[in-house]
Amino acid sequence: MTTRCGVVAVLGAPNAGKSTLVNALVGQKVAIVSAKAQTTRARLMGIALADEAQMLLLDTPGIFAPGRRLDRAMVKAAWEGAEDADRLLVVIDSAAKTGGKVAQLVDGLAERREPKILVLNKVDLADKNALLALATDFHARLKPEAVFMVSAATGDGVADLKAHLAAAMPEGPWHFPEDQLTDATDRMVAAELTREQLYLQLHAELPYSAAVVTEKWEERPDGSAAIHQQILIERDSQKGIVVGKGGARLKAIGSAAREAIAEHLGRKVHLYLHVKVAPKWSEDRGLYEDIGLDWAD
């Protein structure tokens, strides 16, 4: 039996559906998703299997023009994820306006030496007449080895893409056990699942600059886990938004996050959330390691 294993960097603009696509390729949820752009912050690896191939899918933050240190760290993580990958999966939101910034991103990726695959995502929402023109334009710019039209949300076209990736992986031993789906630690996944609930439940009310850190993790004799997390926000006015009237919003966030974490761990979870106002949390070097990012100058 000849096994294959390789690295696939999933790149694109914010909100192109990269995390949803990684989840679809893995077959289970390993990356958090929301309608909020730039939900993904750090490089997270999803591990997909097909035939005798293991694909190490690097779900990278969206590439955009960075301003703050946090933004620079996220963009740095995206570009570093592309280095020496066996394939670059360039994901485009085919239902959105693909103006100058997206074209500029594609042109920048075209200069890289790694083999590239163009994925037009969200085709279920796209204008069919414009889709072919979009594919023709970006094919000419990127010169990929293949083009796939998919809907990561519905699963349309994902199986064909996965089969192509599996065949493209170089021969070699698998890097991870068959039942491992991600390289993220349970502490990191727990924090991400709580952050996902912040975005899902608060929508536009919560600014992008919020973070969740798992501060303490206790294994209890009954097999359950007691997890203490801190939600970091930048201004006092945001605390009331997160906590809600009489603590109702924070309770709802905690309840949903606890269920998601328990499902991930496969056991009972006790989740304790604390909201802290930390105006300069994004300048705290130690927190970057906690959320899976390198410090950016």
Image (tube, grey):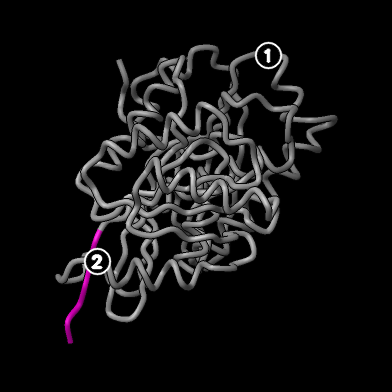
Q: Is residue 4 magenta?
A: yes
Q: Is residue 106 magenta?
A: no
Q: Report the front residue among 18 and 214.
A: 18
Contact between marks 1 and 2 (CB within 8 A): the answer is: no
Please indicate whether residue 107 sits to the left or right of residue 194 in the image.
Answer: left
Q: Which residues are magenta?
A: 1-6
Q: Which secondary structure, mark 1?
A: helix
Amino acid of disc 1: Asp
Residue 215 location (% of width, % of height): 45, 36
Please indicate whether residue 291 sits to the left or right of residue 24 in the image.
Answer: left
Q: Residue at x 18, y 66 (%)?
A: 170
Q: Counting other residues with Cα less than 10 Å from the Cα at mark 1, is it few (<14), some (14-19), or many (20 or more)? A: few
Q: Counting other residues with Cα less than 10 Å from the Cα at mark 2, is it few (<14), some (14-19), or many (20 or more)? A: many
**Label 1 belongs to which residue?**
236
Image vertical order of residue 192 relative to residue 63, above or below: below
Amino acid of disc 2: Met
**Label 2 belongs to which residue?**
169
